[in-house]
Image: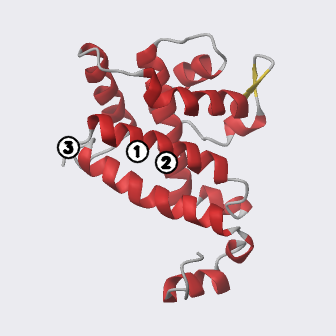
Amino acid sequence: MDDGEKSASERWLYENAPGFKNLPDRDRRAIFDFSFLWSLFEAQVMDNFAQARTIEERVNGWGNEEVIYPEVYEEALAYFRNRYCMNGELTYHFEYLRLRPSDSPELVANVIKGRNDEPRDSMLCVLMIVWRLKNNLFHGAKWAYQIRDQLDNFTHANAVLMKILERYGRA
């Protein structure tokens, strides 16, 4: 990153991680920030235990309490709809989320296609996408294409995580 001298781990990544040195600083920064924001989200919102099931339970709880606010997710949802749907059909990017059965793939697809605009479902859709971005990053899938073209994904994921932490986080 551009904060002066590179750390030992960053120098190692430059030398050994495929494509790392070709990533623009902004991309690396967004991914770096995501790592910390996800960790904080998991600690302060998910009681140190995030899974698709527990994320859905948390969103259901917010829905039952009527504390789901569109301003938390609407900008990211607009971006994800544009990325993952064109002319009412899912784009090739959608399959690379690698949604699993527990990730509510049908709900995510319907929200992305604009067939479902319920606040609870929209919030869950966005969080399932952020969840998959996290899993695909931390479990290696993003390295298949050297983490290229991920700036917007992680910028929007980071914005959602910050808004959720501000609204629902517990210190």
Residue 101 visible to an observer of this rendering:
no
- Amino acid type at mark 1: Met
Mark 1 Cα-neighbour bin, 10 Å: few <14, some 14–19, many ≥20: some
**Residue 77 picture location, percent across and down:** 57, 28
According to the image, label 2 marks what residue? Answer: 158
> Would you place residue 104 above or below residue 13 in this image?
above
According to the image, label 3 marks what residue? Answer: 170
Instruction: Indicate left or right for 122 with 79 as reference.
Output: left
The span from disc 3 to disc 1 (Cα, nearest Å) is: 13 Å
In front: 106, or 33? Answer: 33
According to the image, label 1 marks what residue? Answer: 162
Most extreme residue toward the right is 87
Label pair 3/2, CB-CB below 8 angstroms? no
**Residue 115 picture location, percent across and down:** 62, 10
* Numbered label attached to residue 65: none
> Would you place residue 88 above or below residue 30 in this image?
above
- Amino acid type at mark 3: Arg
**Residue 16 picture location, percent across and down:** 64, 83
